Image (cartoon, coloured by chain):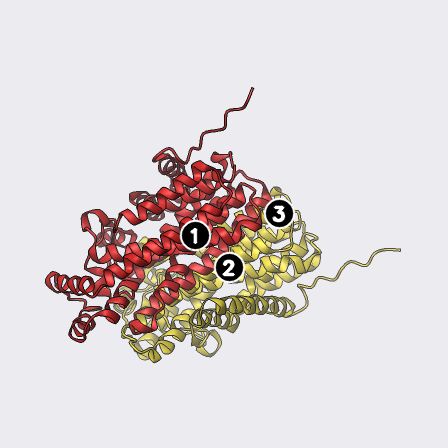
Chain colours: A yellow, B red
Amino acid sequence: MTTRPTPLKTTAAGQVHTDVDRFLKTFFAQKIKQSRAIDDNYTVLWQALRDVTLAGGKRFRPYLLLLFYEGYGGQDYESVLPVAAAQELLHTSLLIHDDIIDKDYVRHGEPNVAGIFKDYYQQFPLSGDTAHYANSAALLGGNLLLASAYDLTTAANLNATTKLSVLQELSRSIFTVYGGEMLDMESVMQPFEAVDSLRIAELKTAYYSCIAPALTGAALAGAGKSEHAQLKAFGTALGIAYQLVDDLLGVFGDEAVTGKSSLSDIREGKRTFLMAQALALAGRPEQKILAASLGKTTLTAAEADQVRTIVTNSGARQATITQITAYAAQARASLEKLPITGDAKQALEQLIQQALVRVT
Amino acid sequence: MTTRPTPLKTTAAGQVHTDVDRFLKTFFAQKIKQSRAIDDNYTVLWQALRDVTLAGGKRFRPYLLLLFYEGYGGQDYESVLPVAAAQELLHTSLLIHDDIIDKDYVRHGEPNVAGIFKDYYQQFPLSGDTAHYANSAALLGGNLLLASAYDLTTAANLNATTKLSVLQELSRSIFTVYGGEMLDMESVMQPFEAVDSLRIAELKTAYYSCIAPALTGAALAGAGKSEHAQLKAFGTALGIAYQLVDDLLGVFGDEAVTGKSSLSDIREGKRTFLMAQALALAGRPEQKILAASLGKTTLTAAEADQVRTIVTNSGARQATITQITAYAAQARASLEKLPITGDAKQALEQLIQQALVRVT
C-alpha cells in the first residue's frame, strides 16, 4: 500500500490568503484585547493596524514562503503559518513607514494608518497639528508590526533552534531592506543618472519579498545551505522583475486596478529604471520636458499624459518590458534547477507568469 | 576549602558602562562593515546610530538587568551582556523616534540622528526638504535599533529556550512602551486634567526601563515566576520615581547637567504630574498665566522663570518631591522582600538614592 502524498495546501487557489488572514485576525483580536488593558486609545491604533493589514494586498510573501516550504517536502502547514504571516506584518510595517516618508495618506484606495488618525484626531479637544500626530501614530504603529513579526515567529509552535534560525533570517532581511529604503529615500536628492535603481530594487524589494521567504520556507522544510545560492538567484530575479512591473504600473497602470494614483510616481520624481531609460533615450526637447515634469508636485493630468507619451515613444517602456522579460527568464532558469516538487514548481512558474501578464 | 564567591562585576563602579560600550562598539563595527557591502550611504546611517548610542546616557537599563542577574546568583556575566546591551538599543531606538515626534534635533547636547542627517543632506545635489529626509533617516535608524535589540538577543551565547523566553519579554516590553508612547503623544491634544501622567509614566518609562530589565535579569539567573509580582512592584515604583524626577529636571534642572533645554518641556506643554499639580494648586491669576505659557512655542526665558515661580509657590514642586519620595519608599519596600544578594540589594538601594539626590 502506498501512502497518498499530502496535497499541497498552497496550490489551492486563494487558500493561503484565506488561511493567513484567518491567522492574522486571531492575532489582531488578541492584541486588541491586550491593548484594551492598557488604554482604549491604544486599541484604536491596533484596530487601525488590523484594518490596514487585512485591507489589501495578495499575501504574496506568505504564499512564497509556504510554496517553498511545501516544495521542499514540509508538511506541517499549520505550524509554519505564523512565520508566513510574520512576513506579511513586516511588509505592512514597511508600507506604513513608506507612506510617512512619501507623505501619503491613502493606500489601496483606503485611508492608511496616518490617514485614519488624521481624521480621528479632529475630535480631540486640542487637536493642533493633527497631520504630525497622525504620522507619529503611524510611526509607532509601524514599529509595533515590525516587533510583531519577531513576536509571531518567537511564539510559533516549532522547535527552538529552528525558530532562532528563522529569527536570524528575519534580522538579515530587515538589515537589507532598510539599506534599500535608505538609498531609495535618498535617491530623490540625486540626479537620475546617479541612481542604480536595479540595485535599490534588489535591496528594497527582492530581499524581503522573495529571497527571505524562499530561504525561510526552504529552511523550515529542512533544506540545507547548498540551496542558498540558487534560491537567492531566483528571489533576486523575481523581486527585481516585480519592482520593474510596479514602476511601469505606477505610470501606465489603471488606478482602479492598482489602487494608487498614476500621477504620484511622476509627481514624486521617483527614480525608476523606466524614467532613467526615458531620460537617456529621449531626444533633447523631450528630455527637457521630462526634467521639468519629474518631481513637479503640481503636475496636471495633461502634463502626465505628455510624460507617458515621451516614455513610450523614447522606447523606455519597451526597454523596461524587455528587462522584465529577461529577469523573468532568469527566475525561470533558477527555478528549473531547484530540487522542489513539480506542484510547487508549477505554482512558482505561475507567479512569474502573473508578473509579466500585468504589463505585457 | 571553601570556594570564594565570584565578586559581582556589576557593583564595581562604571564597570557595566564600560563593558556594555565595549560590546556595543564591536556590534556597531560589525554592522558598519556589513552596511558597507550594501552602500556607503547606508554606512553613514550606521555610523550615526553608533555615535548617538554611545554619546550619552548611563546604561541604566543594562545595569539594572545585570544587577538582578547577579543578585539572583547568575555568574555568566559575559553571556548575558548582549541581552543587557539589547535593552540599551531599545532605549536608543525609542529616543530617536521620540525626537521625531517632538521635532527635536539635539540630544545630550549633540545632534541626534535627524540632526546629523539634516546637516549631511545639505551636500546632496538636490537636497530639497532636508528636514523631512533627515527625519526619514531617523525613522529608519530607529527601526534598525529596534530590530537589533531582537537580533542581539537571538545571537547571544545562551540556550535556545532561555533566549526565546527573553525575546518574549522583549516583545511584551515593546507592546507596553508603545502604548505609553501613544498616550503620551496624544496627551498634548488633551487638557491637563484629562491626562493620567502617572499611568503614562508606568507604561512609557517604568516597564521597559525597570520592570523588563528586572524580570529579564532574574529569569536569566533562573528565578521563578513567583518573584514576578515583587519585581514588577519594585520596577513600577522606581520607574515612576525616575520619570517624576525627569519632569522636575525638565523645568528646574541645570541645562549643563541635563544636556537639554529647560524651556522645551514648558514650550511643548508636556503633560507632567508637576504641571497638573501646579494647575490644580495655583490661584486663579496664576492658573491663567500657566494656561497661556504651557505650550507657547515662543516662550521667553523671563516667562519661563515666571512659570517656575508659580510652580514652586503653588506647592506643586514640593508635592512632586513628596510623590517621588513615596515611590522611592515603595521601591525600597519591594526591594527588601526580594531574595537577592546583599551586594545587589545595596547597589539597587544606591540607584534609588541617586534618583532622589538629583532633586531633593
Nearer-N-terminus badge (2/3): 2
Residue located 18% across and 69% down the image:
B293
Q: Give the alpha-carbon distance from disc 3 to disc 1, as whole Å.
A: 29 Å
Where does label 3 land, which residue? A160
Q: Which mark is residue A148?
A: 2
SS state under label 3: helix
Measured from the top left, where is residue B301 in percent x and y? 12, 60
Identify which amino acid the numbered label 1 is placed on.
Gly
Looking at the image, residue A118 lies above or below residue A6: below
Residue A261 seen in the current view: no
Q: Residue furthest right?
A: A1
**Is residue A290 at all visible to an observer of this figure?**
yes
Q: Identify the residue position indicated by label 1 in the image.
A: B235
Question: Disc 1 and disc 2: Cα gap in Å?
Answer: 24 Å
The number of numbered badges drawn on the structure is 3
Residues flagged by tags 3 and 1 on a common chain: no
Q: Nearer the viewer, mark 1 or mark 2?
A: 1
Give the residue furthest to the left: B302
